[in-house]
Amino acid sequence: MPEYMVDPTLAEMGKNLNEAMKMLEDSQREADEEREKKKYARKDIPGPLQGSGQNMTAILQLVQNLMHGEDEEELQPHRLQNVGEQGHISLLGHSLAAYISVLDKERLRKLTTRILSDSTLWLCRLFRYENGSAYYHEDDREGLLKVCKLIIHSSYDDYATEGFNVLHNKSPVLYISSACRTGLGQYICNQLGLPISCMCSVPCNTMFGSQHQMDVALLERLIKDDIECGKLPLLLVANAGTPGAGHTDKLARLNELCNQYKMWLHVEGVNLATLTLGYVSSSVLAATKCDSMTLTLGPWLGLPAVPAVTLYRHEDPSLSLAAGLTTSQPVEKLRALPLWLSLQYLGHDGIVDRIKYASQLSQRLLENLRKLSSIRTSVEDEFNSPVVVFRFIQEHLQSVSILDGAQESTKDSNERETDDALNRWLGEQLGQLVPTSGVDVVELEDEGVCIRFSPLMTAAVLNTAPEHVDQLAECLKAKIPILISTLQLREEFKEEVYRVTGLNYIEDLSWPGLGAVRYEVNNEESDPEKQQLAMEKISTGLLKKLKELDSDLMFSTGPEFGGEKNCIYIGMVTDNLDVPELVETIAVTGKEIEESSKLLENMTEVVRKGIIEAQQQLQKANEAKLLEEGVLRQIPVVGSVLNWLSPVRSSVKGRSFSLAGGSLEPTDKLYALKAQASEGTPPPTPTTSRTKHKSPGQKLFRRSSRASASDTVSETSMGHAEAMEESQTITETTRLEGENEIPKSSEYSVQLNGDLELPGPIQPEGKSEENSRNIHEVHQTSESAVAEDLEKEDLR
């Protein structure tokens, strides 16, 4: 058969054509498939769920954006938790729990039973709680809620069948300390379906003992009164470390009282962590005899996402199962897996070292606070207190409280509110300057606003070190002079504002700063809305002007909520503040803004009248021009010819409109004034009477030195000023004599010392030499006076 020769170019073109057709067919097929999917797809499915799903990279990127924020404006410094190896072990526990849950039932049951029993045994041994059971829960209030259900099942026999009907005849009563967490009693009543009347808040001591401890005598009277009323006392919630001040109730006495009236005693608090130490105070050790306690191991040990634990003692497992403290579901028991892994990783020594380290940080800060006379501390045990609460107090009030033992309630209400505002500002400043310290602001019933340092809850999470505690003490020491200066200058600022007309002092005790002032507008407007708008406009402009000044003061509109309107709030100040200069600057600036605003308000009417007047004068000028030049000159072509043949000088004069006077004036005066202004010097800029010469780098509203220092400087500089004045007088006299002796001439000049040429006629040879000698002697005298003056300055 004959062989056909194929052209390679044609073969390549055919191959490319086949590939192109295949690509077109595939794209068409994909478009048809996509169109078919859209035809049957639901339109209400959210965007991320549409289609075949997303890849892992896109999902992780979305999570990262949600964690750190997509916009740069949202990026703010946060307290990031220190996730070390023990944190990785805890996080691994959650992944393992999800993996273990898919095992077969028998293997899963054995594994979860082992994990639960080991964790319960280890915790009971660590915290000296014998023969106890454990319930693991995410919400730290859930353990107390399950305990309440257990108590109700135990106290009411028919509760499982009759339900809430059995509670009608004998209403249960739950006693909670007033120092407990806010809303705890209401949460329990809402979850159990009980009325709020079933909760009884027990006050703390008022006469004897700590003000943060439960009043045991009053509690006993409340229990007796409820029993006489036919009620059933069920539960008492006590504190081993109150949420605010970290104080411990008298647990031994409370335990005896609960045994006497057959009540359940539940204890919670940060001081329970010290049960793992070798030495435990007797007040905290009594918690081991209570019926139940809640432990929050996550913050204590720096373990993320580990559950809280409630240890309890009860003999009937069926009631525990009915209350939800135990479960038959193996997956529920896997909650203990992260804690089971973390406890093994840390070991007994690791757990004890972390809690002991936190206690040492508290003692370190307490030693630094004892050196500060303006700081008052509120700790239960000065030698073993894991929580330190302190606040700034005015020195005269502190001396009174030390002498007569009076408490915060004896203070004046205004001073108390002022101190609370200053301490709130101080706590916020310390938290921003040393974020790793973990300090926060708390408000106690008796002391007021305080600053709390609780390293047991924050040190392991924020990785707090001893140098951070020292840095906190240094920052506190640096802020105390600012607080004292602000308190001292407040009264002077108030008096100075009352002295200056146009300003009104605003009393706002909740503002942590020098004070607030309002500029009063001299407005005769009868409409209150227009007055308010004018005042808002001037206040906004005044605040903007004050912020533009080169000063260290903070000007603002006040707090976000509850502040006075149209006021200028001034922040914290130092002791070298010039209060009169500050007040007068505010008054003068406000006056300038008010005058400029009034000018702008009248500008519309003035301009409108000026335009009408200008139109009338222009019309009169045109009529006069028409009468003067005639009608022929107004015709375009004829007028041009006539003007070329016989030019006519126009009599129309220019006009200028004065915005200040609101009138039209001839331009002749304006041109004359401009000519004079170009030849003369501009007038000086008016300044306030208190405008002072500031040295380079010195901020506004700052005194250059104290009164005594200024007196000393003035005395020492008196001699120098007199010497300089004498030297200047000699130099001036010499210059005048030279001018008088040597008349001016446009043709000749005499050179003095080779520096200055003065015009003068040619003198005879003898007289010229005599004049040169006199001038030379005077210059030598002037130079010697200057040298003597410099030597005096060096000696000083």
Image: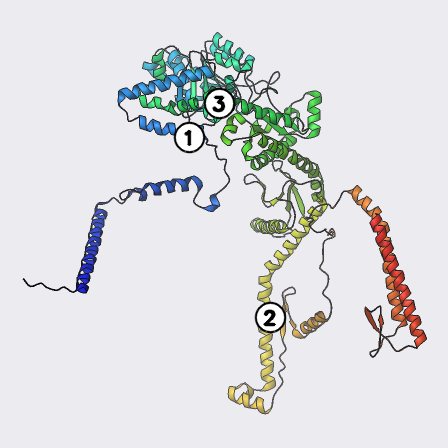
Left or right: where 370 falls relative to 608:
right
Q: How is the image coloured?
A: rainbow
Between disc 1 and disc 2, whose residue precedes? 1
Instruction: Tell me the SS state at disc 1.
Output: helix
Distance from label 3 to label 1 (Cα)?
16 Å
Distance from label 3 to label 2 (Cα)?
93 Å
Question: Can residue 144 be seen by looking at this rendering?
Answer: no
| Quadrant position of residue 11 | bottom left
Distance from label 1 to label 2 (Cα)?
85 Å
The residue under the point 34% across, 13% down is 318
Instruction: Tell me the SS state at disc 3.
Output: helix
Q: Which x, y percent locates residue 43?
A: 27, 45
| Quadrant position of residue 171 | top left
Residue 613 image label: 2
Left or right: where 108 falls relative to 380:
left
- Asked if residue 743 is positioned above or below residue 780 in the image, the reply reads below
- Asked if residue 279 is positioned above or below residue 515 in the image, the reply reads above
Q: Which residue is mark 3?
A: 350
Between disc 3 and disc 1, whose residue precedes? 1
Instruction: Tell me the SS state at disc 2.
Output: helix
Residue 88 image label: 1
The residue under the point 38% across, 22% down is 336
- Which residue is more in the foreground, 784 or 511? 784
**Residue type of the residue flagged with mark 3:** Gly
Left or right: where 97 falls relative to 578:
left
The residue under the point 20% across, 59% down is 16
Residue 599 image label: none
Crowding around mark 3 (Cα neighbors within 10 Å: few <14, some 14 to 19, many 20+) is some
